[in-house]
Image (cartoon, rainbow, N blue to C red):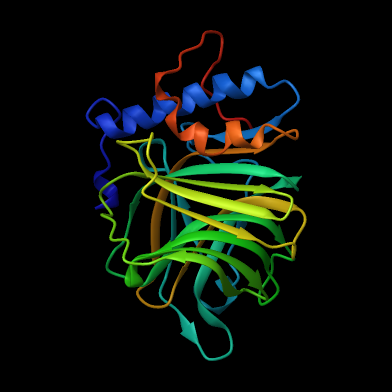
């Protein structure tokens, strides 16, 4: 399934996603005081990213590939009474965020396994049995969208939407924002970036800063998720609203002088 990802020319939804990402870069360029990290993975690598495979030495390493300019994360099935389930992450350790706005496209995922996938923010102590932070993710087995906090790699719910049945062959955009203790998140279809499918919100002051990235897990069957068009911003006060849910609907914006390239 994931090996059959089509090109932008043959896939209008993905092409729209690319245009939206370009438009977002235009908006970011106008915000001189904001720092941004972007990666569309067109260069076929993840330079600047830190890969996390906590169970590699126990026979469950992560595999990171770049099919058709996307970012595919795979982890084999694993379950152990002390070590836990198959899991891993890849994140940008070079910037620590307090206020943040992070978005990523989910192009495909395996619906045959009990997989969780999404965005991690204010991550800390990233290591086996120690990782903390906030986690905005979708849980296909239960048709649930979650906003959680992590303690020692365990998830604890802050807000959730149930009964949310997604199609793994449909592209989605996940957007996760934090301003002080206020956390908010939204999920969009790439074919309709003006109206979110679902939104989540919570107030929590447990973690104040840390890097952001992509987090995956599976209780059975292993992990297989393909991401694209990662954007993370450290905004100045007052810009979170613009760079948050508003970034999903920038497809109509055009600008000149912005080159599409990965910012490592």
Would you place residue 59 above or below residue 158 in this image? below
Residue nearest the viewer, comparing 168 with 94: 168
Q: Residue furthest bottom?
A: 81
21 left or right, relative to 169: right
Residue nearest the viewer, comparing 41 with 18: 18
At which x and y percent is residue 125? 74, 66
Would you place residue 130 above or below residue 137 in this image? below
Would you place residue 57 above or below residue 164 in this image? below
At which x and y percent is residue 251? 40, 24
Residue nearest the viewer, comparing 132 with 4: 132
Residue drawn at x 60%, y 70% is: 54
Would you place residue 56 above or below residue 68 in this image? below
At which x and y percent is residue 222? 39, 70
Residue drawn at x 33%, y 71% is: 141
Can you see residue 61? no
Can you see residue 195? yes
Residue nearest the viewer, comparing 61 with 175: 175
């Amino acid at each position: 399934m994931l090996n059959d990802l089509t090109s932008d020319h043959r896939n209008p939804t993905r092409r729209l996603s690319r245009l939206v990402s370009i438009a977002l870069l235009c908006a970011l360029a106008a915000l001189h005081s904001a720092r941004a990290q972007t990666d569309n993975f067109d260069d076929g690598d993840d330079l600047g990213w830190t890969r996390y495979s906590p169970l590699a030495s126990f026979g469950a390493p992560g595999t990171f590939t770049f099919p058709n300019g996307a970012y595919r994360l795979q982890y084999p099935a694993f379950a152990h009474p002390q070590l836990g389930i198959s899991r891993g992450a890849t994140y940008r350790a070079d910037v620590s965020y307090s206020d943040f706005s992070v978005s990523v496209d989910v192009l495909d995922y395996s619906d045959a396994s009990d997989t969780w996938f999404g965005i991690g923010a204010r991550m800390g102590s990233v290591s086996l049995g120690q990782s903390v932070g906030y986690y905005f993710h979708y849980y296909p087995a239960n048709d649930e969208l979650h906003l959680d906090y992590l303690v020692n790699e365990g998830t604890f719910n802050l807000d959730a939407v149930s009964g949310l049945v997604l199609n793994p062959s449909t592209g989605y955009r996940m957007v996760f924002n934090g301003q002080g203790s206020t956390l908010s998140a939204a999920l969009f279809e790439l074919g309709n970036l003006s109206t979110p499918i679902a939104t989540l919100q919570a107030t929590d002051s447990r973690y104040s800063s840390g890097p952001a990235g992509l987090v995956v897990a599976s209780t059975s069957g292993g992990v297989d998720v393909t991401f694209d068009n990662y954007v993370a911003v450290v905004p100045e006060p007052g810009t979170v609203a613009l760079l948050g849910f508003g970034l999903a609907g920038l497809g109509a914006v055009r600008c000149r002088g912005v080159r599409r390239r990965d910012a490592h």
